Amino acid sequence: MTVIVLSGPIGAGKSSLTSILSDYLGTKPFYESVDDNPVLPLFYADPKKYAFLLQVYFLNTRFHSIKAALSEDNNVLDRSIYEDALFFQMNADIGRATKEEVDTYYELLHNMMAELERMPKKNPDLLVHINVSYDTMIRRIKKRGRPYEQLSYDATLEDYYKRLLRYYKPWYEKYDYSPKMEIDGDKYDFMASEEDRQIVLDQIVAKLKEVGKLPEDWDKSTDIQIEA
Ligand SMILES: Nc1ncnc2c1ncn2[C@@H]1O[C@H](COP(=O)(O)OP(=O)(O)O)[C@@H](O)[C@H]1O
Ligand SMILES: Nc1nc2c(ncn2[C@H]2C[C@H](O)[C@@H](COP(=O)(O)O)O2)c(=O)[nH]1
């Protein structure tokens, strides 16, 4: 039984890989609240006004998801609570939150993380981080086509996205809630290329074997799923 959390910048391929991976391993996917998120379009229209509200919205949904995932112990999450502060801190650093909002946010996050510490299973089993360059990120954002994420919607998004990418390296290095691994999202087109998809899945399976979450002789072709 495994809980795998994905991470990576906007458009890196987290939702896509969540779907591929959960299907491959026979586990349940948890997706972020995006298209049904009422605060997201408000945030892109007026980031300073809505940065705190959006973060509380995401934090709340991520808290629910990680609690359910750790309880069920058979899930893949397309972004998790462990990445939440990266976004808020970056927005705060560019003046989109007051000191009171920052203090309240970190107190709330701290309380939620303390709650997770009290669960029988406290941490995920693996973090899969997808690295992408700025060019790949923009190409994928364009391909997906959410209007408010496009550079044509707001030219300052170029700086926002470049800044966001810079926050990921130190975040990944510091992350220590579980074993972790990186996927090269520039190199592997796991959407269009079956060969690339298998390479990425093999990398993840090898890591799961290395950390003892899959038996050494596990093989997809002989894996039998038992219906509950
Ligand atoms: N490795 C990849 N190669 C090519 N296209 C990809 C890849 N990963 C995702 N995409 C495409 O990029 C867009 C964004 O992917 P998505 O999974 O929604 O990213 P995220 O959840 O990280 O924001 C989608 O249109 C998806 O089909
Ligand atoms: N300010 C924040 N924005 C966030 C956060 N998590 C996601 N997002 C935004 C970024 C994208 O526009 C959209 C979906 O993200 P994907 O990476 O899944 O494409 O939501 C956050 O915590 N704070």
Image (cartoon, grey):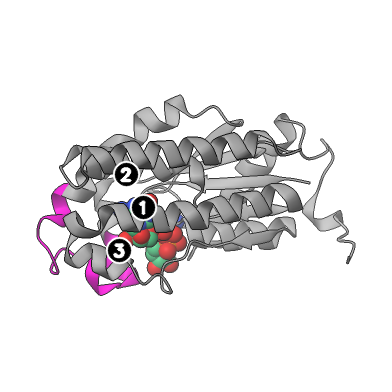
Q: Where is residue 24, by image quadrant?
A: bottom right
Local SS, label 1: helix
Give the amino acid type for the residue marked by disc 3 in the picture.
Answer: Ile
Specify the label residue 55 is tagged with: 1
| Quadrant in the picture for residue 214 | top right
Name the residue that disc number 3 marks.
141
**Looking at mark 1, is its residue's CB closer than 8 Å to ligand 2?**
yes
Task: Tell me where the magenta segment starts and ends, as one range.
Answer: 139-159
The residue that mark 2 highlights is 88
Sequence order check: which comes first, mark 2 or mark 1?
Answer: 1
Q: Quote the CA–CA distance across marks 3 and 2.
A: 20 Å
Q: In the image, is 14 to the left or to the right of 204?
A: left
> Mark 3 against mark 1, which lies toward the viewer?
1
The percent position of residue 6, horizontal first and vertical second, equals 52, 47
Instruction: Residue 95 in the image: state x and y as whole percent.
Output: 15, 43
Q: Does the residue labelled 3 lie within 8 Å of ligand 1?
A: yes
Q: For residue 145, which quarter of the picture?
A: bottom left
Element carrying mark 2: helix
Q: Earlier in the sequence, mark 3 or mark 2?
A: 2
